[in-house]
Amino acid sequence: MTYARTEPTDQEPDIRARPPLVREFLLVAGLFLAYKFGRQAANGHVEEAFRNAGNVWDLERALHLPGEGAVQGLLLHSQPLIHAANTYYAAVHFPATALFLVWLYWRRPRHYVRSRRVLAALTGAALVLHLLFPLAPPRMLPAAGLVDTGQVYGPTVYGQTPATDTMANQFAAMPSLHVGWAVMVAVGLIVATRSRWRWLWLLHPALTLLVVVGTANHYWLDAIVVGAMLAVALAVFRLPPSARTAPARQPRPDLRGSVEGSPVPAYAGGGAPGAFASVGPSPSFGAAGGSAEPADGADAGSRAPARAGAAR
């Protein structure tokens, strides 16, 4: 009987799976910069962004999704609460994801490689969707009747004039990478750790979802779409077999000292008493002499009369 254990089998990282540090730093930094400048390149398309926003808003109502205003109404009851939500939106997104990658790189290198690939694929696909489907956030849509909490209560990462904002593309609401990255952080830490408290990491994406909706920066559909994209990325970039399971334990020997699948001793030779003829179950022994059954068919035939005589 064999026993299989899932990764991580202990708390020591597999340093052989850790990619070169300088290369990874340049790669991850390059991905962040490429996405940021890519979003800025996709800026503009104001009329199309507002037209798409109206379609998304109507689709949500047709699907009977809860109104974003219900979440914002809860936050607006307390100015410190709405200020905390704006701060969470502005300050947690990038640092949390960066710390997640750093910890995986140092403690779970195999999981790091997979997570980095998933995040890169998700971010690249999101950038393509931003280019193809510009979308104004609900805080800009008059039909939504929502408050731009960042501009009113602060802090905010966006300029007051979205069409000329040089810091960020405000017409890239679909999909929400705030939610996508937060879900990936939670999933990555749950898979890479074995603490009984690891499921509490799900609070990060849950809180992020409430924040992006309550601050009117994203629609519910923005989170649904990024969740589907992340599921596809996780299915494509799976852990290699060597990282998913640890090597199986060797079975314990029985009382006779023979183990199925154990290596043949170096001193084993043909015809010697007690020698094993092949790797596998222990050879059967005769009732009288105690010698091993011969492995060769011809040899067995020549000894048959002797055994018959001994039996008589």
Image (cartoon, grey):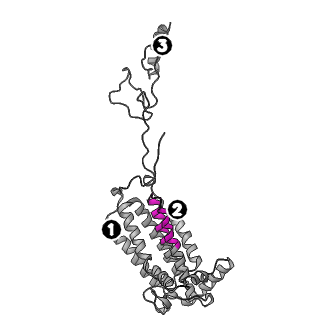
Given the image, on which type of amino acid does mark 3 rest?
Ala
Classify mark 3: helix, strand or loop: helix
Q: In this orientation, does residue 133 appear?
A: no
Q: Nearer the viewer, residue 173 or 201?
A: 201
Measured from the top left, where is residue 6 in percent x and y? 46, 52
Q: Amino acid at mark 1?
A: Arg
Q: Residue at x 51, y 75 (%)?
A: 208
| Above or below 36: residue 289 | above
Q: Is residue 306 above or below residue 67?
A: above
Q: Are marks 2 and 1 in contact (CB under 8 Å)?
A: no
Query: Does label 2 or label 3 sit earlier along the sequence?
Result: 2
The first of marks 1 and 3 along the sequence is: 1
Most foreground residue, 306 or 139: 139
Tell me, for residue 113, which label it has, or none.
none
Residue located 43% across and 49% down the image? 246
Q: Which residue is mark 1?
A: 23
Name the chief secondary structure element in magenta: helix
Disc 2 designates what residue? 235
The answer to whether residue 147 is magenta is no
Residue 198 in magenta stretch: yes
Label 2 – label 3 distance at C-alpha: 62 Å
Judging by the rendered image, the residue that carries numbered circle 3 is: 304
Neighbour tally class for label 2: few under 14, some 14-19, many 20 plus, Cα within 10 Å:
few
Label 1 secondary element: helix
The image position of residue 65, as x and y in percent, is 65, 77
